[in-house]
Amino acid sequence: MDKLSAIQTFVRVTETGSFSAVARELGTSQSSVSKSVAALEKYLGAQLLNRTTRSISLTEEGERYFEEVRRLVAEIHDAESALKKGKHQLSGNLRVAASVGYGRMVLMPYINEFLAQHPDVKIDLNLNDGFIDIVEQGIDVAIRIGDLPDSSLLAKRIGTSQRALMASKSYLKKVSKTIGIPKIPADIEHHRCIIYTGIQSRNIWEFHSKDGSSIKVRVDGNFQSNSSEAIRAAGLSGMGLCYSPIWLFYEELKSGEIIILLKDWPMNSLPIHAVYPLQRKNSPKVKSLVDYLTNALGQNSFVVSSKNH
């Protein structure tokens, strides 16, 4: 048995979920691919795949083994590509993770540009507003907003997420003759607030004055969500005030559909990091993508004109 070949075959069968698909890739028979994986299982003394007539799935031991050897296969592919095509020509798979809203609204245009520059790279973008274990999920690089917990992962700061108090023009028109438009942080207590539950502060919104003082306001409202997409939809429909990143409403801020409030009381900005496992430190694809995003986000900051008030 060619152990490396068997491992590579097992990884592709797991990624595609199909013996026949891998057989077509390799130009061989389905039975040959199946025998290769079976030989690997025999060598390891463990069943890696559950097989039925309709599908295959990883066993518990197979899941652990896959996450380890997948990185090994990727590193071998990177090394081979660097020798065959030159270090500036990238190829192979790259698994990227980000939150749903940021991935869709900010990352996608940059990923499109990155792939245009590196047509032999294939990006698998995992969008999830919850926390995911990037090592367990086999993610090569994750884009995370906010302070990072201590971990064995490597991280590089690639940008800043500026936040502000915002509301739709329709909401402000509705409340202007009743409770009024907020002029100071304390005024927010009289308003319905759209609460994002994906951060620890949740219903405690903090503001800073120009003299350095700060104030925390406990807010309330009749809608909350852990999804930035849902917060965006609620803000656009006039359901209340939003404590949100600029990028979430960037186009609407430029058009005037969404208005920034309390500009004399700015909110804390959050760091944006690219996070990746130690094993991917020397990956040319990871380094190239991280460097590209660092440069792109630095040149295309989400800053709104002072005309928005």
Image (cartoon, grey):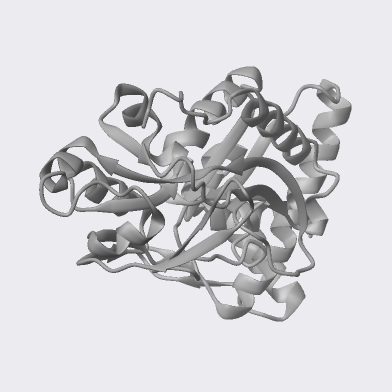
Q: Which residue appears at 60% of the width and 53% of the height?
A: 144
Q: Position of residue 81 (x, y in %)?
A: 80, 31
Q: Is residue 31 visible?
A: no
Q: In which quadrant of the rendered image does the C terminus lie?
A: top left
Q: Position of residue 39 (x, y in %)?
A: 69, 67
Q: In which quadrant of the rendered image does the N terminus lie?
A: bottom right
Q: Which residue appears at 72% of the width and 53% of the height?
A: 276
Q: Which residue appears at 41% of the width and 66% of the height?
A: 217
Q: Position of residue 37 (x, y in %)?
A: 64, 63
Q: Residue furthest front?
A: 211
Tell me the quarter of the picture where residue 90 sits: top right
Frontmost residue, 66 versus 54: 66
Frontmost residue, 181 versus 28: 181
Q: Residue furthest right?
A: 83
Q: Does 55 appear above or below 270?
A: below
Q: Is residue 56 visible?
A: yes
Q: Position of residue 264 (x, y in %)?
A: 48, 42
Frontmost residue, 260 versus 144: 260
Q: Does 7 appear above or below 62?
A: above
